[in-house]
Image: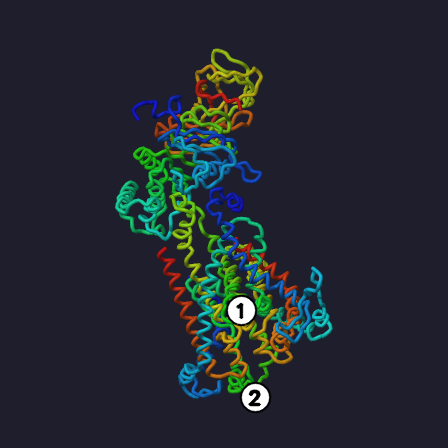
Amino acid sequence: MNIKEIQIPTFLKRIFNGRNTVISIPYLWLLFLFLFPFIIVLKISFAQPVLAMPPYTDLLKWGESWWPTIQASFDSYLFLFSDSLYIHAYLSSLKIAIISTILTLIIGYSIAYSVAKAPTQWRAILLMLIILPFWTSFLIRVYAWIGILKTEGLLNLALTTIGIIDKPLIIMNTDLAVYIGIVYSYLPFMILPLYANLEKMDMSLLEAAADLGCRPLKTFWTVTIPLSLPGILAGCFLVFIPVMGEFVIPDLLGGSETLMIGKVLWGEFFYNRDWPVASAVAIILLAILVVPIMFYQKSQEKAIS
Amino acid sequence: MKKFGNFNIVALVVGFSFLYIPIILLILFSFNESRLVTVWGGFSTKWYVELMQNQGIKDAAWVTIKVAFISSTVATALGTIAGLVMTRFGNFRGRTLFSGMIYAPMVMPEVIIGLSILLMFVTLAIDRGMLTVTLAHITFSMCYVAVIIQSRMSSYDDSITEAALDLGCTPFHTFRLITLPIIMPAVVSGWLLSFTLSLDDLVIASFASGPGATTLPMKIYSMVRLGVTPEINAVSTILVGLVTLGVITASIIGRRQKNTN
Amino acid sequence: MTETTTTEPWLDSNQKPYIQIENVTKKFGDFTAIDNLSLDIYKNEFFSLLGPSGCGKTTLLRMLAGFERFTEGRVLVDGEDITEIPPHLRPINMMFQSYALFPHMTVEKNIAFGLKQDKMPENLINQRVEEMLELVELTDFAKRKPSQLSGGQSQRVALARSLAKQPKLLLLDEPLGALDKRLREQTQFELMDIQEKLEVTFVIVTHDQEEAMTVSSRIGVMDSGKLIQVATPTQIYEAPINREVADFIGDVNIFKGVYKGQDEKGTQLLSEDSKSIIYATQKVDVPVGNRIWFALRPEKLEITKKLPEVDCNILKGKIEDIGYGGSFSTYHVKLENGRQLTAIRANRERTAEHHLTWGDEVYLHWAPHSAVVLLS
């Protein structure tokens, strides 16, 4: 395919001398509004906070000479590593992201597998039912759990009415509530790539395995799971990466001891107004995520072409 | 005919209950007479009436709709171009970076995108408001559109474009008369996705917006922080209803188009 | 069609070629798809480019249409150099292998598309579309969308669309490749009728040698970006230029050996198979002792149980396999040295008088004028 496209005839190039113009429109947009801002974040992370607007010092100081003096300060980074709060927040985010990715994978796989195995005429409607909540507001879906999980909420009401428990469970404002919120909100992101993969899977492979004397559970582990690996990876990336920086769910469902780096960043920025530290937090988070993001990009490009 | 297996039935029932019970309860309690969200005090639409009198919510809704409409329209145009560039322009200098900039915003934590775009606006001394929110929304929405267009184009027969050129159509008219109509369903679903993404976004809007440009999610968020109220349930119900209606309409249009084509 | 000069213009040095392909080369990076190729095609010809996949025939066609840039060389159509003209301005139309019908337009809109680009008045467009629909017998399907057509109907719409603009040259890329065998054979004749009726020059790309033989005025056999032989179907079949062409067009038995000179029966070849001298009438001009080949079509091999009463070209063997093909049967005969030859015999009698069966000892022989001498 590439060979054919590189060889776009000269006349096409001449007519489309716009070709480069066409490329440059979205390119410049993303360069300017996506990439360029990161450079600014990087720059500000090396600045020092001041009480002014904007609340940070300039990196380049224009003195009397022709050249500006660079006033890079590593204070923000040193601060991040000296205060155990930040390291804890990173580690805790990592822990929460890993555990909730695994939970989402287990639940998502069961659902995606069941939809892919459902009678053909049911599949479209089941898939639609999975996508539907994905289109409705994230915030609303998280909010819906507050009413259920609160101490005087619907879950405790239901459980005490039935008589399973006599004292209400404390779920709200704990890590458990955060896990429930994350699994719930990110489930469609896990199910969709898994389903896309499982649906395409040749069912005769499973029949062949059975025919060769493989028991169903073993077939599942030795045939189905390895074949659906691309879907599993895509789903896990789609959950793990954004969850690492999640803010809304820990903020609304988590308690004061629920540490997540997205919440810390938000706090540094909006409450402490320490923009250099907020920037440094973002840069380190980005450094942690850059490898998974690149893996995700590669896997998506491969899937599409 | 194939039937559901036992495990599959259980997984689907449990899975869908998990997905839908919270939303159903949310909708149910928006019609609750009582102010308490856990006690059913009888059916009432009074929270909707109250909502209609809440100027703050109405303003926020109006801002959100304007931002969503403009940002999804621009994002669809830019994203469509980006998707075509990715699939039909072969290799060009900086292609890897371009593809990286398209895929990264889809998974990048929102706090990072929000913070970075805000800091840029501050650096360039651009006043924060509706414009900045709109620009931010265009930037991440266009990436979703680009990916939708890209996957549509991967099953597009190139010789259709060549046939049009061969029959005397100029490259520009070929795009307008042939390519665009054929990929239109993908363009429409790109627009719808952009619209809901913009409608939904709290984190990036909170960073990018300024005074006078409070969006609905920002308004709801500040209300939620003060506690659960039937009023929030009511506004949520309206949003869920609108989105559901939109998605179902879109899928019916899509299916009809598939049938006639 | 009355004079021989117009049916075989390539033999007449006064005729001017209509399409002149001059020293054309096409490279994709390091890969040479078309290698310094020259070819003249005459007006109203039905010219076939035939070759295995990857031989460059489709690339050449796409270059004529304007979708591939020329690395070197040029192409003239009716005296005009079109090398640098973009596809939408060339007086050439193409019928695509996938048909490439516009899925969102009806049949008549598809056919009218090219005419609309020329800004032809509405009433003339309608008239022309009607003519084309009649030509391909699809008048009743004018309002249908491509998805509601069968393969054969789609093929005809694609043909009508590409002919609507009355191109100077029509390019057809595997036009019948997607049809089943019966429909393909029927459509071949339709295609020939239409070509004669409209007097348009056709260049067709195909990998199907039977198709090329049936429809073409001339065939260009291609391999590795080069034309190996350009000739009429009969010449290609009966007088292939080398083993490659002989092997590619139809079945053939090749005898390998050493040239031993000429005598009254013709060219002598010391066969590696029978270790005896075999003959072909055709004369060659190479030194004695050179390696040469005889090519013999299976239907020219006589197969008998009795020793035939001829004085040369007799080989003995055993029937290994029989393929019954209805009007004819194919026999695979194993020679004493293990070499297998193919012979075809028409089944003229219903009951098997000269019944041949598996394991029969048989004799194969041929007339010296049936064999072709090949030097490479």
Q: From the top left corner, tell me how far across and down residue A192 is, in percent.
A: 51, 64
Which labelled disc corresponds to residue A166? 2
Front-most of residues B133 and B39: B133
The numbered mark, 1 or 2, whose residue comes first in the sequence reads 2
Nearer to us: label 1 or label 2: 1
Which residue corresponds to the image point at 35% horizontal and 36% vertical from the top-left?
C188
Residue B165 placement, left or right of C197: right
In three-dimensional space, the C-alpha distance between marks 1 and 2, rounded to whole angstroms, equals: 32 Å
From the viewer's perspective, is residue C45 above or below residue B125? above
From the viewer's perspective, is residue B76 above or below residue B157? below
For disc 1, the marked residue is A187
Front-most of residues A37 and A112: A37
Front-most of residues A23 and A80: A23
Which residue corresponds to the image point at 70% horizontal and 64% vertical from the top-left?
A63
Give the amino acid at mark 2: Asp
Quarter of image, res A150: bottom right
Residue A15 placement, left or right of A71: left
Quadrant holding the N terminus of chain C: top left
From the viewer's perspective, is residue A219 above or below residue C368? below
Q: Would you say residue B95 is visible in this rendering?
A: yes
Q: Are marks 1 and 2 in contact (CB under 8 Å)?
A: no
Q: From the top left corner, tell me how far across and down residue C282 is, in percent.
A: 47, 17
The secondary element bearing badge 1 is classed as helix
Q: Chain of mark 2?
A: A
Same chain for the residues at labels 1 and 2, yes or no?
Answer: yes
Q: Would you say residue C246 is visible in this rendering?
A: no
Give the amino acid at mark 1: Leu
Residue C163 placement, left or right of B23: left
Which labelled disc corresponds to residue A150? none
Color scheme of the displayed model: rainbow
Front-most of residues C146 and A30: A30
Quarter of image, res B97: bottom right
